[in-house]
Amino acid sequence: MADAEIRTIDLPAAVAALEKHLGFRSERTRQLARRLQETGMLPAGSHGVSARLDVHDFGTLALACAAGGTIAECPERVATLDRLLPGGIDASDFPEGVRKRMVPAGVDLDAMLRMAAEGDDCLRQVRIEVVSSWPEYAVIWQASGEVRRWREPGSLPGHWAAGHRRSTMIDGKALFYAVQALFADEAADAA
């Protein structure tokens, strides 16, 4: 799927897919979506017309569901998770060229979702963990057990920040099937 052909879906379809495939309650997902729309992180619909979401927007909503916290905290939690860096590297003193090549967590998630929409099954091989006790996003490769962690700059990956650790684990297979159901060419042709 080329960038010029980015498919969109309506918000109720995204909410239904998140509940069906990932188990996120639709009532809370709708509340999170409304809060993200109020802050401009998701597109808003118009009177009588549902908002249209692309793959990036779907990822933002899925991340909001997994991030935990209150509805009011949702936009800040998602924005923080989006900008986490691999291994918690503090790149502030790095040359500009190096900083541009570092892939924040949000970009990593977007890439995996876009690849899933195009039929690449790499997402089926991972689990995604979103820690709500402190900002952390992790991708766990199921075959090898390798874990890639994104943390705030200066924090140590693999170390607990403080207190009790709470997280949500997203099964990559379930996320792959949700993306396929919503954004794959066959699904878009049927819409």
Image (cartoon, helix red, strand yellow):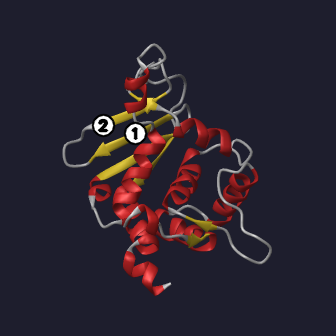
Q: Which residue is mark 1?
A: 138
Three-letter code for the amino acid on which mark 2 is drawn: Val
Q: Which residue is drawn at the image coordinates 60% and 63% (left, top)?
A: 25
Q: Which mark is residue 147?
A: 2
Give the mark, 1 or 2, whose residue is nearer the N terminus.
1
Q: Which residue is drawn at the image coordinates 40% and 36% (left, top)?
A: 103
User: Measured from the top left, where is residue 180 in percent x and y?
Assistant: 39, 70
Three-letter code for the amino acid on which mark 1 is drawn: Ala
Q: Residues within 10 Å of mark 2 (few under 14, many from 20)?
A: some
Judging depth in this view, the residue of 94 and 170 nearest the camera is 94
As drawn, the residue found furthest toward the left would be 144
User: Measured from the top left, where is residue 149 in percent x and y?
Assistant: 38, 33
Q: Which residue is drawn at the image coordinates 72% and 68% (left, top)?
A: 45
In 3D space, how far apart are the residues under numbered discs 1 and 2 (Cα atoms)? 7 Å
In the displayed structure image, the side of residue 10 where residue 145 appears, left or right: left
**Residues marked 1 and 2 touching at CB (< 8 Å):** yes
Q: Secondary structure at mark 2?
A: strand
Q: Quadrant of the N terminus?
A: bottom left
